[in-house]
Amino acid sequence: MSGTKIFVLQLKDVIKTIVFAVLGLVLILLLIYLFVPRTSSAPQAPVGAAYMPGTYSAEIILHNAPVEISVTVSDQEILSVTMTNLAETQEVFYPLFQPVMETLSRDIVEYQTTKLEPSVDYPITSQILLDAAQTALDKARSRSASASLW
């Protein structure tokens, strides 16, 4: 006897092996996509953005009292973002708002957008302030759009 061996493969076993191999490959590619760091360039200012010049504000409530986020714009750019009416008790209960606002204000004016990544250290505080600044900018844009209709 020459030692010839015959293998019998059932079709369902072959199909299972192919399906699991494809799923494994998809899972590996998904993990690589999720965990490989991406190089991010600085956010770009929106092209052709036009504002109605002025100062616009949005309110957030901290410790049962309103705090205003004011955004000053010219016709083509964001000039400043400030937080006003922050009472002493609010500063005590929310000590991160002032330093995070200073950082975000600088970034918003530099990049001319509120589409920034929230701070890794203080994501909730950053997102609250970015949303308020975006609300104020939306007011500046809507006034600009309504003024252009007339």
Image: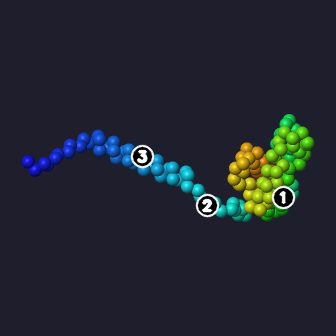
Q: Which mark is residue 80?
A: 1
Expressed as whole percent of the image width and height from the top left, the position of residue 21 reads: 38, 47
Instruction: Answer with mark 2 or mark 3, whichever residue precedes in sequence.
Output: 3
**Apparent side of residue 116 relative to residue 58 in the rendered image (left or right):** left
Q: What is the quadrant of residue 109 in the picture?
A: bottom right
Dot 3 alpha-carbon crowd within 10 angstroms: few under 14, some 14 to 19, many 20 or more: few
Q: Secondary structure at mark 3?
A: helix
Viewer-nearest of discs 1 and 3: 3
Dot 1 alpha-carbon crowd within 10 angstroms: few under 14, some 14 to 19, many 20 or more: some
* Three-letter amino acid code at the position of disc 3: Leu
**Residue on which the image places disc 3:** 23
**Residue on which the image places disc 2:** 39
Q: CA distance from mark 1 to mark 3?
A: 51 Å
Viewer-nearest of discs 1 and 2: 2
Residue at (84% x, 58% y) in the render: 80
Q: CA distance from mark 1 to mark 2?
A: 28 Å
Q: What is the quadrant of residue 148 in the picture?
A: bottom right
Q: CA distance from mark 2 to mark 3?
A: 28 Å
